[in-house]
Amino acid sequence: MKQLQWLKTQVGIFDTPKVRYMLHQPNGDSYYVIWCMLKDMAGKINDRGYIYLSSRQAMTAELLARHLGRRKPFMEKVLELFEELELLVREENGMIRLLTWEEDQDYDTLQRRREHTRKRVAAYRQRQAAAADKTDAHHLVEASCFAAAPQTESQVSCEEAEKADLPEPLQRAGDYYQQHFGMISAGTVQELRELEADWGTEAVCDAIDKAYVQGKSHIRYIQGILRNSPRYTQEEQDNEFGFSPAVARKLNQLFSKTGPADR
């Protein structure tokens, strides 16, 4: 692929909690330098934030250490921290992918996805309105069905009609995933249910859409999208960068030790 000529970065990068946490580590400057080097490598490859030697050869911690002139144990420690901060992910095949790449570099694609999400949310609301209309009709049938006490044949027929008029349930993430990618394992169904419990059905379906656009069906990819997506809840307002609870606790511990003057 064609190499990028420029890399984008946000203004105020050194005020973000992830970078501040990075810099507060022993040899923290080295952590940030390596992060910049990884972004530069991803820009040279220019493949959706992936870092590799070739499409068949992953870039391991040992190879990265040689390439960047660092010791392997230190490089492994750096990669583990970056994974903990949800800056990158090492996939099952060993490929390294920067999770913030598209957010930082691919503005046009993000705009198209936002438009797609806007249209899907509008369709979802229309379905909700239609479901509400069906619910009103169901209440009318219910009133007529239970007016008479005896269980007559007409009453049984009325109950059957009532069942037929019930609103269709909202589509679950497992069904939505299967429509996009086909076969789905029981383990993936369970993981999608857990994601729905944490993020809500709408957010998980949105992540499935994004994974489908990229041709990635792995559940870990979908989890990565969710972790790097805004959560429109009070929790997100309190936790601006959407860290996992473990990361948020570590950040709170760090800043409580440094004191107000260091913040």
Image (cartoon, rainbow, N blue to C red):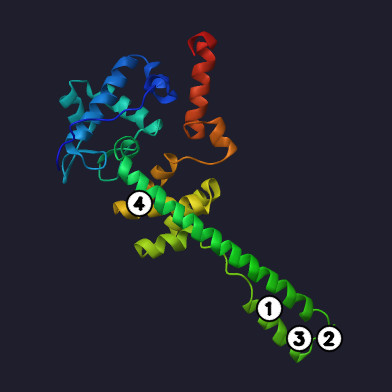
Mark before the other along the chain sequence, 3 or 2? 2
Front in this rendered view, residue 150 or 207:
207
Q: Which residue is mark 4?
A: 211
Q: Nearer the viewer, mark 2 or mark 4?
A: 4
Query: Which class describes the residues within 10 Å of circle 1: few (<14), some (14-19), or many (20+)?
Result: some
Name which quarter of the figure residue 183 lies in: bottom left
Mark before the other along the chain sequence, 3 or 1? 3
Q: Height in image: 47 above or below 263? A: below
Name which quarter of the figure residue 141 lies in: bottom right
Q: Are marks 3 and 2 in contact (CB under 8 Å)?
A: yes
Q: Residue furthest top?
A: 261
Q: Are marks 3 and 4 in contact (CB under 8 Å)?
A: no
What secondary structure is found at the residue carrying circle 3? helix
Q: Residue 217: in sight, yes or no?
A: no
User: Could you tell me how far apart the alpha carbons at marks 3 and 1 are, in whole angstroms?
Assistant: 10 Å
User: Could you tell me how far apart the alpha carbons at marks 1 and 4 are, in whole angstroms?
Assistant: 39 Å
Residue 15: x, y in percent?
42, 20
- Circle 3: residue type: Gln
Q: Height in image: 204 above or below 25? A: below
Q: Residue 240: in sight, yes or no?
A: yes
Front in this rendered view, residue 25 or 5:
5
Q: Residue furthest right?
A: 149
Q: Which residue is mark 1?
A: 162
* 89 relative to 255 in the view: left or right: left
Residue 127: x, y in percent?
55, 64
